[in-house]
């Protein structure tokens, strides 16, 4: 009996934490389907009496659609570059024979500890001098560079465990290094690559500071910065703000729903060694 | 075989794209920031070398020290909240059904952008229609505070969403570490008559101390450079009451065009972060490795 009571108490604690973690989001979803009159007069936790799906349509056509599209291609391009370059570098560092490989790996790992805000002002002036300010390519290469260390760290463990026989057999058969890398190694590393893709997606999709600093034209803004300005316009319409925020978090939520184990794996391997 | 795998040209070809990117976009800026800090510069016009003037000004600048104080306060908060996360993880790892699902639910806020978190919590804290004050109203609080506009509580108000955001992350790390403890150790303790509480505090906790120390470093360093959420929620206001080092630097450079002085603050932020990292690592260094 006492043990049963103890367990009930523990579950109660855990349920309370779960509630605290998702309640604000449920509240957000609920008011994204309400109009101001209902939000301000009714209970905050009541279901919408007449769901205002129009809120979503209004904000999508009011500019969120363009920001969404920008986020998609900038996030996607940066992921491809990051994972490709990180895989190539990790391959050369872990599988090929050269003297400075440990030193170079160390430099990549130092990149994990740098406070990005200290690099912000110089990056801005560097991009300004090569005319990349207000150009989405500045965002793509910055995302790629700053995600390389974490991506390589996740890849490293997997590359170290690959058996040497694979390469030996391929090379003896007359396979070139490029063929070996692109046709054999990359396909083998698909499971760990998919983890890095998800982690990169979450980072890029949510990134705010770089876009806010380097991009000024509305046409190039991504969702994070776009909605920040957008909400300024709609300051009083809570339903529209709620719909905007739900749209902005939906892709990552969907990815998490389907690949939660990959996300967990990526986040924990990125932290413990840090 | 060895000849092919040590071809210098091919190695260069594979390493250089990544290496040049981090060299140019991460390491060069870190060298430049210290250099810019020696200049009087508005970001676009010519630079004038003024020696250490910016750094001397920073040391005498009470706004900078106030922002540094807030950053360190944040670091203290974050470190203390680790105890809370640890407690939840210990419960979660004690043969709880659905633990896997729960830790995923806890992680959800971590996956949101700082803009989404900030805008959501601005609404939660809304003085008249926000979730928090509505709930307080039910409990009969007649005059609930205006959370983000009151200089005496704004920093604490901002800390709650940060706690909310990172809870799942730290619980995930602790949970993974706790699950790594061999079951035989726990079983042996149980046979010797240890209570679940004793097992948690005397056996599990000491065994994951290494991970706890890593998270202390993460929490302290992460707090010192914390920026996004505060910048979006309050812009450092009201009247500097929630300003932190990074937001102070950002406002100096990109709102008031004081790039030289902003760079000096950015350089100090870099140095302070690195020094504190070394100190915290030293303080939490393992005196003896625990073997099992």
Image: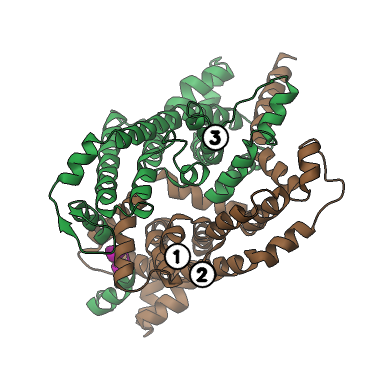
Q: Are marks 1 and 2 in contact (CB under 8 Å)?
A: yes
Residue position for label 1: A215
Tell me which label, 1 or 2, sits earlier in the chain.
1
Is residue B24 highlighted in magenta?
yes
**Residue at 76%, 39% in the rendered image:** A40
User: Is the C terminus of chain B in the top left, top right, bottom left or bottom right quadrant?
Assistant: top left
User: Is the N terminus of chain B in the top left, top right, bottom left or bottom right quadrant?
Assistant: bottom left
Q: Which residues are magenta?
A: B19-25
Asked if residue A112 shows in the view, the reply is no
* In the depicted structure, whether residue B287 falls above or below residue A179: above
In this image, A4 relative to B279: left or right? right
The letter of the brown chain is A
* In the depicted structure, whether residue B141 falls above or below residue A86: above
Q: Quadrant of residue A226?
A: bottom right
Residue position for label 3: B148
> In the rendered structure, the residue with mark 1 lies on which chain?
A
Badge 2 element: helix
Same chain? Circles 1 and 3:
no
């Amino acid at each position: 009996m006492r043990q049963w009571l103890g367990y009930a108490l523990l579950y109660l604690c855990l349920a309370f934490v779960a509630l605290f973690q998702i309640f604000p989001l449920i509240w957000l979803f609920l008011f994204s389907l309400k109009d101001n009159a209902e939000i301000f007069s009714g209970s905050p936790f009541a279901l919408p009496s007449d769901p205002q799906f129009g809120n979503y349509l209004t904000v999508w056509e009011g500019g969120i659609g363009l920001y969404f599209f920008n986020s998609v291609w900038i996030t996607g391009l940066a992921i491809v570059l990051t994972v490709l370059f990180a895989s190539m570098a990790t391959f050369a560092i872990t599988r090929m024979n050269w003297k400075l490989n440990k030193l170079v790996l160390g430099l990549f790992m130092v990149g994990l500890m740098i406070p990005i805000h200290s690099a912000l002002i110089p990056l801005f002036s560097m991009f300004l001098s090569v005319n990349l300010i207000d150009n989405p390519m500045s965002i793509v290469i910055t995302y790629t560079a700053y995600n390389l260390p974490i991506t390589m760290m996740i890849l490293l463990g997997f590359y170290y465990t690959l058996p040497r026989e694979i390469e030996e057999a391929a090379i003896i058969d007359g396979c070139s290094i490029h063929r070996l890398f692109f046709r054999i190694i990359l396909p083998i590393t698909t499971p760990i690559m998919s983890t890095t893709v998800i982690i990169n997606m979450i980072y890029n999709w949510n990134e705010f500071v770089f876009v806010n600093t380097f991009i000024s034209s509305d046409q190039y803004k991504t969702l994070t910065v776009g909605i920040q300005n957008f909400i300024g316009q709609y300051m009083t319409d809570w339903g529209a703000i709620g719909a905007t925020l739900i749209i902005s978090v939906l892709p990552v939520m969907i990815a998490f729903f389907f690949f939660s184990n990959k996300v967990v794996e990526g986040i924990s391997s990125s932290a413990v060694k840090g | 075989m060895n000849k092919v795998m040590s071809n210098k040209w091919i190695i260069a070809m594979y390493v250089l794209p990544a290496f040049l990117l981090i060299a140019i976009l991460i390491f060069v800026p870190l060298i430049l920031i210290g250099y810019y800090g020696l200049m009087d510069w508005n970001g676009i016009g010519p630079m004038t070398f003024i020696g250490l003037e910016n750094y001397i000004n920073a040391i005498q600048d009470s706004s900078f020290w106030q922002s540094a104080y807030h950053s360190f306060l944040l670091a203290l908060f974050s470190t203390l909240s680790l105890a809370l996360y640890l407690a939840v993880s210990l419960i979660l790892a004690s043969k709880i059904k659905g633990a896997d699902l729960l830790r995923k639910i806890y992680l959800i806020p971590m996956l949101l952008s700082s803009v989404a978190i900030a805008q959501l919590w601005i609404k939660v804290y809304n003085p008249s229609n926000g979730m928090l004050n509505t709930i307080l109203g039910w409990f009969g609080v007649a005059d609930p505070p205006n959370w983000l506009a009151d200089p005496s509580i704004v920093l604490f108000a901002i800390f709650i969403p940060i706690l909310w955001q990172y809870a799942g992350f730290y619980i995930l790390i602790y949970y993974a570490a706790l699950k790594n403890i061999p079951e035989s150790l726990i079983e042996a303790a149980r046979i010797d008559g240890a209570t679940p509480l004793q097992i948690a505090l005397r056996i599990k906790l000491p065994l994951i101390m290494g991970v706890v120390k890593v998270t202390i470093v993460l929490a302290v360093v992460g707090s010192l450079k914390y920026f996004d959420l505060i910048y979006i929620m309050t812009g450092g206001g009201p009247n500097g009451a929630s300003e932190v080092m990074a937001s102070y630097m950002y406002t100096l450079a990109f709102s008031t065009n004081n790039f030289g002085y902003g760079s000096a603050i950015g350089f100090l932020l870099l140095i302070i972060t690195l020094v504190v990292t070394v100190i915290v690592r030293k303080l939490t260094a393992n005196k003896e490795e625990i073997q099992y």
